[in-house]
Image: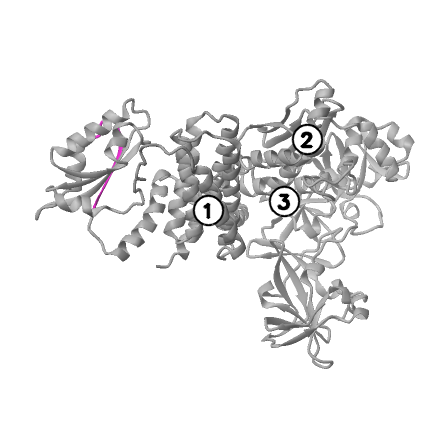
């Protein structure tokens, strides 16, 4: 993996206390938390379905998908609507922090991290220790896993 | 001039032409002497050339122009049609396809593609060089520009210039005579500058049904001109006054006219984006939900005035729903016409000779369902050509016709489309499948020996099954029937396989024709509402604990004098594991001939719902066939009764 300059616009959000990011071009809208209808027999990380202005969208609990600790944040939770393979999917995140343009080098994910449960969903890392932002690999997160 | 607004139109129009080009060229390859096919190909190329030129895609226009020249020579029999020329035209079609794909993505074709294009242009130009005919006809200028050098000499101070477009009726017996009469009549009250096509072409009947006359007259009433020309055997006359324009205006108008000309050919159709159709469908879906809600309220109000109005609204809603569904229908030919090329190319790579037959091109089905079908069908066709069909040598050795036959057909069976892909190839050896299933550890030798042929074929659609000995370019690797199967099932369809070893195979796909609106019974389990298709609900009743028996460790009740399994719906959906005492509201569901009963929390009501496909995340197990929106506006899952645990 080579270093590259990331000068794209990112949506920065929290999962727990950690910061994560997705390119704004991937995020179609940010929706308020709403009633999610659970789906029996669905994979555990799929919270359920919402009615988004007449279209029915599956919602993924991003925290559970990344295998992060289950700390309910509650109030500030929102649903990011992303498009993947022609389908809209919702991602629950704890809080949206900002939309920022980054003009710095993103670093590859250290190999040790890629082997952790959540690390395999990381694309690259922006910034230094304290202000670290992990850019997520949407394709991996939304890939279907063989049962 | 800003040409981007025409770009999308160019892309969609050109794609349509490319589909018909492919079809006509394939047919021409088989019937090289059919002049109508050459004409059709020529016309499509000509149109593409015109459109490309008008939006400044010179490279595309150039190639189309060279191809058009070549076709023109073939048409005029100055050249004899041979394989290199057919291949070159196929190559140009491929080139045009990739160039259009670039444009569709909002990019200009890349340099490498451009190089390929100009290489191809030269190649075609070389192919077009042939024994020169004595007469080199100046290509008639049909670019749409009005030739004022021919109009101006006829103009006087008080004359007006009109372009009169005449469309003859479809079944006019003597077109040239009719055209002559029209021109003759017009000359009684004005002067004809020129016509498009040219007069000699009109006289030689070298036109379809329409022609334009550039006409100078002292009359200044379009109505008057129309009535003087008369209506005998004429379907339509359009008249517009022509004014000499600046160069800039000329360019702009030429661009527009290339497209309006196209539009005039099909005045009854309007292009609507699929996105808009989907939105319409969603809205109608919501409307249907609210209609049901309104009906309920009206009933409660006991006010006949309100009830009558609601009835009216309900009727209109039903009709609207019907019309929206109908507007989404497109003919199978939309995707079918791409397949002859797929089969031809696959056969060519494998050095097989295949007679490909298409049946049922005209069958109409919902656009989104049709789009989902394309990929599985390509896969099945390639499979047939690659694995199903023997080599020519093998076919001869087994006493078969050297040319193999692959047939793709579509027909309507009840509310569904039955699509079959059939070949007369080597067939599928079900014993070999059984052997392989044992090898894979899917079943024991004992188990498979008792399986029917049909059951053996089910192994074919399992992930990881592949009988091809070697990987070929045509079928690729790794993608098997399992993908086809899951795709078809996600559309609410089914697939079955029939085959006789040595004689051929048949893949049968059953898919819905349109997005379903179904009547459902709504029931609740664990506070969630689920929809059960009314067609599979046999009965609802209140279950008493004393009627439940236990047979071989499973709970059952007697229904129509047979024991049928009974359990809580919430348990079948894995929402709970404890059984407890079975009693309360119960539904009996029919599933492919057998029955099963489910105890629910309560009956919620009946509702007509528009079935929407389930997200692919939730498609993995087949417990639900789709999803809909409840009266309260929440997503509501539709239970696939056939796959519900008993």
Q: Position of residue B416 (x, y in %)?
A: 60, 32
Quickly name the residue at label 2: B507
Residue B555, how many percent across, how many down? 85, 39
Q: Which mark is residue B12?
A: 1
Point out residue B494 in the picture as x, y percentages from the top left corner. Answer: 68, 35
**Label 3 packing within 10 angstroms: few (<14), some (14-19), many (20+):** few
Q: Earlier in the sequence, mark 2 or mark 3?
A: 2
From the image, state whether disc 1 or disc 2 is nearer to you.
1
Q: Is residue B502 visible?
A: yes
Q: Are marks 2 and 3 in contact (CB under 8 Å)?
A: no
Q: Is residue B529 magenta?
A: no
Q: CA distance from mark 3 to mark 1?
A: 46 Å
Bounds of the magenta segment = B231-241
Picture layout, residue B31 above or below residue A144: above
Badge 2 and badge 3 in a common chain: yes
The part of the image, by quadrant, that contains residue B450 is top right
From the image, tell me which residue sits under label 3: B605
């Amino acid at each position: 993996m080579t270093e590259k300059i990331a000068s794209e616009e990112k949506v920065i959000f929290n999962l727990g206390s950690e910061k994560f990011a997705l390119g704004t071009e991937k995020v179609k809208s940010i929706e308020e938390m709403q009633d999610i209808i659970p789906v029996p027999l669905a994979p555990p990380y799929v919270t359920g379905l919402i009615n988004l202005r007449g279209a029915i969208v599956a919602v993924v609990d991003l925290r559970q998908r990344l295998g992060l600790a289950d700390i309910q944040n509650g109030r500030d939770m929102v649903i990011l609507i992303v498009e993947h393979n022609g389908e809209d999917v919702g991602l629950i995140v704890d809080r949206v922090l900002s939309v920022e343009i980054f003009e710095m080098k993103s670093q590859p994910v250290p190999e040790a991290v890629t082997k952790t449960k959540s690390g395999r969903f990381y694309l690259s890392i922006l910034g230094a220790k304290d202000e670290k932002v992990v850019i997520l690999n949407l394709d991996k997160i939304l890939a279907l896993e063989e049962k | 001039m800003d040409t981007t607004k025409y770009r999308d139109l160019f892309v969609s129009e050109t794609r349509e032409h490319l589909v018909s080009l492919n079809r006509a060229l394939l047919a021409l390859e088989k019937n090289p002497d059919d002049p109508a096919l050459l004409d059709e190909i020529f016309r499509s190329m000509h149109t593409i050339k015109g459109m490309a030129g008008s939006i400044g895609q010179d490279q595309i226009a150039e190639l189309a122009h060279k191809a058009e020249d070549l076709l023109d020579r073939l048409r005029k029999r100055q050249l004899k049609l041979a394989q290199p020329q057919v291949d070159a035209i196929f190559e140009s079609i491929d080139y045009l396809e990739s160039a259009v794909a670039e444009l569709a993505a909002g990019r200009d074709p890349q340099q490498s593609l451009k190089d390929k294009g100009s290489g191809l242009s030269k190649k075609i130009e070389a192919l077009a060089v042939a024994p020169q005919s004595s007469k080199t006809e100046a290509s008639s200028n049909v670019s749409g520009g009005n030739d004022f050098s021919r109009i101006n000499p006829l103009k006087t101070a008080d004359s007006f210039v009109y372009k009169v477009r005449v469309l003859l009726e479809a079944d006019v017996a003597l077109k040239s005579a009719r055209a002559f009469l029209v021109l003759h009549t017009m000359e009684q009250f004005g002067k004809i500058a020129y016509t498009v096509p040219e007069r000699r072409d009109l006289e030689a009947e070298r036109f379809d049904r329409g022609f334009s006359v550039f006409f100078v007259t002292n009359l200044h009433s379009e109505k008057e001109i129309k009535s003087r020309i008369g209506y005998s055997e004429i379907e339509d006359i359009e008249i517009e006054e022509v004014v000499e324009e600046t160069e800039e205006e000329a360019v702009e108008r030429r661009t527009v006219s290339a497209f309006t000309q196209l539009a005039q050919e099909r005045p009854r159709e309007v292009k609507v984006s699929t996105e808009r159709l989907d939105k319409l469908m969603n809205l109608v879906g919501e409307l249907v939900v609210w209609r049901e809600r309104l009906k309920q309220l009206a009933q409660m109000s006991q006010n006949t005035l309100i009830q009558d109005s609601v009835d009216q609204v309900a009727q209109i809603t039903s009709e609207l729903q019907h019309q929206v569904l109908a507007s989404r229908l497109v003919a199978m030919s939309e995707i079918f016409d791409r397949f002859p090329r797929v089969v031809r190319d696959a056969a060519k790579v494998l050095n097989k000779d295949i007679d490909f037959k298409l049946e049922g091109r005209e069958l109409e089905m919902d656009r989104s369902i049709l789009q989902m079908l394309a990929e599985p069908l390509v896969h099945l066709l390639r499979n047939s050509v690659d694995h199903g069909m023997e080599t020519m040598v093998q076919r001869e050795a087994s006493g078969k016709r050297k040319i193999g036959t692959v047939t793709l057909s579509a027909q309507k069976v009840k509310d569904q489309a039955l699509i079959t892909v059939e070949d007369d190839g080597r067939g599928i050896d079900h014993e070999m499948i059984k052997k392989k299933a044992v090898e894979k550890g899917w079943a024991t030798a004992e188990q498979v020996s008792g399986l029917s042929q049909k059951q053996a074929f089910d192994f074919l659609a399992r992930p990881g099954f592949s009988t091809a000995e070697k990987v070929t370019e045509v079928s690729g690797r790794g993608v098997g029937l399992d993908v086809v199967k899951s795709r078809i099932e996600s559309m609410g369809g089914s697939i079955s396989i029939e085959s006789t070893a040595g004689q051929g195979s048949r893949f049968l796909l059953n898919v819905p024709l349109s997005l379903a609106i179904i009547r459902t019974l709504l029931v609740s389990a664990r506070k969630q509402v689920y929809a059960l298709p009314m067609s599979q609900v046999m009965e609802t009743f209140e279950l008493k604990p004393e009627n439940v028996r236990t047979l071989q460790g499973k709970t059952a009740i007697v229904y129509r004098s047979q024991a049928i399994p009974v359990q809580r719906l919430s348990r079948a959906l894995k929402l709970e594991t404890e059984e407890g005492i079975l009693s309360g509201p119960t539904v009996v569901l029919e599933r492919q001939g057998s029955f099963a009963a489910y105890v629910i929390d309560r009956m919620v009501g009946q509702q007509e719902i528009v079935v929407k496909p389930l997200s692919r995340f939730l498609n993995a197990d087949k417990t639900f066939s789709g999803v809909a929106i409840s009266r309260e506006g929440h997503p509501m899952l539709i239970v696939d009764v056939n796959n519900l645990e008993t």
